[in-house]
Image: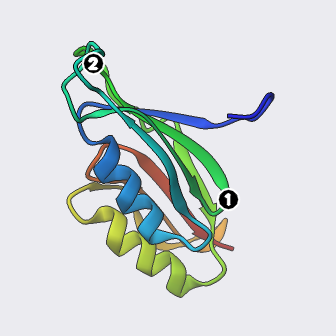
Amino acid sequence: MADNEMAIMLMFAGQAEEASGFYTGLFADSSVEFIERYGPEFPGPVGQVVHARFRLNGQLVVAMDSAVEHAFTFTPSTSFFLTCASAEEVDRLYAELVDGGSVMMALDSYPFAKRYAWVQDRFGVSWQLMFA
């Protein structure tokens, strides 16, 4: 990362590479930039991700597979929030993200948005999708 560059950090338990590929496949202007894997010299499972850098719609995200088990995971109080260009985009992303995940706020119209949903994807990461 460059000096003063800010990123979102996601810590997984063995799914960092799969999640990175899934997320970058959802959005234009998205790509995996770098993946460093655990090898014999690292304290984690060989082949899992020490660090991955990827961009989602230009936003820098860093991911890792933790080498140790933790008593916590992702929390819905922190989520990606995306203002979509159309209701169809909300519907497409909703369908992809909710597959294997769960709905926290149903896909619908609300007083604050023509189309909105809050979901947790199959990796446990929360997403808020809105078309105003």
Residue 57 sits in which quadrant?
Answer: bottom right
Viewed as shown, does residue 24 lie left or right of 83? left
Which residue is at 24% across, 66% downward? Answer: 99
Residue highlighted by disc 2: 67
Which residue is at 63% across, 73% downward? Answer: 84
54 vs 74: above or below: below
Q: Secondary structure at mark 2?
A: loop
Viewed as shown, does residue 22 lie left or right of 78? left
| Residue 92, image x, y percentages | 42, 80
Callout 2 amino acid = Ala
| Residue 101, image x, y percentages | 25, 55
Rate crowding at label 1 as few (under 14), some (14 to 19) or many (20 or more) other CA atoms within 10 Å. Answer: few
Which residue is at 22% across, 16% downward? Answer: 69
2 vs 43: above or below: below
Q: Which mark is residue 58?
A: 1
Rate crowding at label 2 as few (under 14), some (14 to 19) or many (20 or more) other CA atoms within 10 Å. Answer: some
In the foreground, 5 or 97: 5
| Residue 90, image x, y percentages | 51, 76
Q: Which mark is residue 109?
A: none
